[in-house]
Image (cartoon, rainbow, N blue to C red):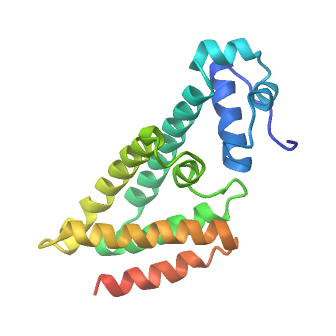
Amino acid sequence: MTGVPQHRGAARERLLLAASDLFCRYGINATGVDSIVAAAGTAKTTLYKAFGSKEGLIEAVLQHEGSSWREWFSDQIDAFDGTPAEKLLHVFDVLKIWFQEDSFYGCPFINAVGEHDLQDDRIRLLTIQHKTIFLDKITSLTADVRPDDPESLTHELALLIDGAIVAALVTKDVTVADHARNAAKRLLV
């Protein structure tokens, strides 16, 4: 696995960042502990002391990725000067920015659920926690747009968002964000 940046800083942080890069780029199951410790410049024992296991590291990576992404996303939406409806449409502009990044490998949560045993709820629960926080942000806007039923609008938009993320990953076509935005605009009329 070449092309993975070497990380500086404390060993735990280096492991977290290296695992995040590798998991997102190559997948969780395709990434072994040896690759992670090599990219982080640490020993296996350091990984196990810091995270207990690869599964513990996976959970830490998802929590870190989710927190970082949600902060970035919220900042982008909050900085946009517009009505709640305009901010909801801006969500898709923000997604398009994300899709254009060289480091866009889809949603780590969607990818992790897809790679794990569907009977194992641990990754699913982390994904639901992430999704709940994200949907709360969307609902704060839909409540002003459709006060009689903000939850339905939130879930309708969430389906467009998730669909755009998966389509952008599969096709590498960032314009799927534009198509999702157009569909969202019809929901907001």
Please indicate whether residue 102 sits to the left or right of residue 77 in the image: right
Q: Position of residue 84 (x, y in %)?
A: 28, 69
Question: Image quadrant of residue 12?
Answer: top right
Q: Residue at x 41, y 53 (%)?
A: 74
| Position of the C terminus by quadrant | bottom left
- Counting from the top left corner in percent of width and height, residue 85 is at 30, 74
Residue 143 position (above or below residue 53): below
Q: Image height check: is 164 above or below 8?
A: below
Left or right? Give the position of 16 relative to 80.
Answer: right
In the current view of this chain or complex, which residue is farthest to the right?
A: 2
Quadrant of the rendered image containing residue 147: bottom left
Q: Is residue 150 visible?
A: yes
The answer to which of 60 and 94 lies nearer the viewer is 60
Asked whether 65 or 91 is in front, the reply is 65
Q: How many marks?
A: 0
- Is residue 10 something that shows in the picture? no
Q: Relative to 146, does residue 136 appear above or below in the rendering?
A: above
Residue 130 located left or right of residue 141 = right
Q: Is residue 31 above or below residue 182?
A: above
**For this rendering, which residue is in front, 93 or 42?**
42
Q: Position of residue 82 (x, y in %)?
A: 34, 70
- Residue 105 image position (x, y, % from top left): 66, 56
Q: Which quarter of the rendering shows the N terminus?
A: top right
What residue appears at the point 29 percent right and 67 percent down from the top-left corner?
A: 154
